[in-house]
Image: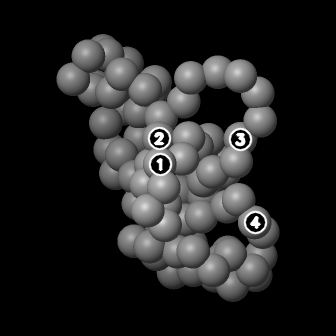
Amino acid sequence: MPGYVIRRIRIAHCKRGPARCDKCREMDAERICLLDICPEGEMQRRAIQVRGVWREFDVLKMFDSEEAAQAYADEHGIEDVAF
């Protein structure tokens, strides 16, 4: 699946983050997520560094464990996995 990676990220409501947003502060937790690093549509998104390049992303799925994330990656051919 080109354009998809699995990373451990902090969940947030918007790109301002918990330091500047009350809703983000409430949601502030680290989770393992499937990220779409080639999202469509013109809107502001958070960004993450992937393979040395900063990419905007959308969170598509959250996993309860590293094992569940790795199983999903193996099943769907996602090679870029980092916890």
Q: For the residue carrying disc 1, how many other residues have a C-alpha within 10 Å: few (<14), some (14-19), or many (20+)? A: few
**Mark number for residue 21?**
none
Residue where numbered disc 2 is placed: 47
Are discs 2 and 4 less than 8 Å apart at CB? Answer: no
The x, y position of residue 67, in whole percent, is 51, 81
**Mark number for residue 2?**
4
Which one is earlier in the sequence, the residue at label 1 or at label 3? 3
Given the image, on which type of amino acid does mark 4 rest? Pro
Classify 78 as above or below 74.
Answer: above
- Mark 1 vs mark 2: give the one in front: 1
Which one is earlier in the sequence, the residue at label 1 or at label 2? 2
Residue 39 seen from this side: yes
Are discs 1 and 2 less than 8 Å apart at CB? Answer: yes
Cα distance between the residues tagged 1 and 2? 6 Å
**Which element type, helix, strand or loop, lies under badge 4?**
loop
- Mark 1 vs mark 4: give the one in front: 1
Residue where numbered disc 3 is placed: 39
**Which element type, helix, strand or loop, lies under badge 2?**
strand
- Mark 1 vs mark 3: give the one in front: 1
The x, y position of residue 17, in whole percent, is 33, 27
**Front residue (pair 55, 35):** 55
Residue where numbered disc 1 is placed: 54
Q: Residue at x 49, y 67 (%)?
A: 51
Given the image, on which type of amino acid does mark 1 rest? Trp
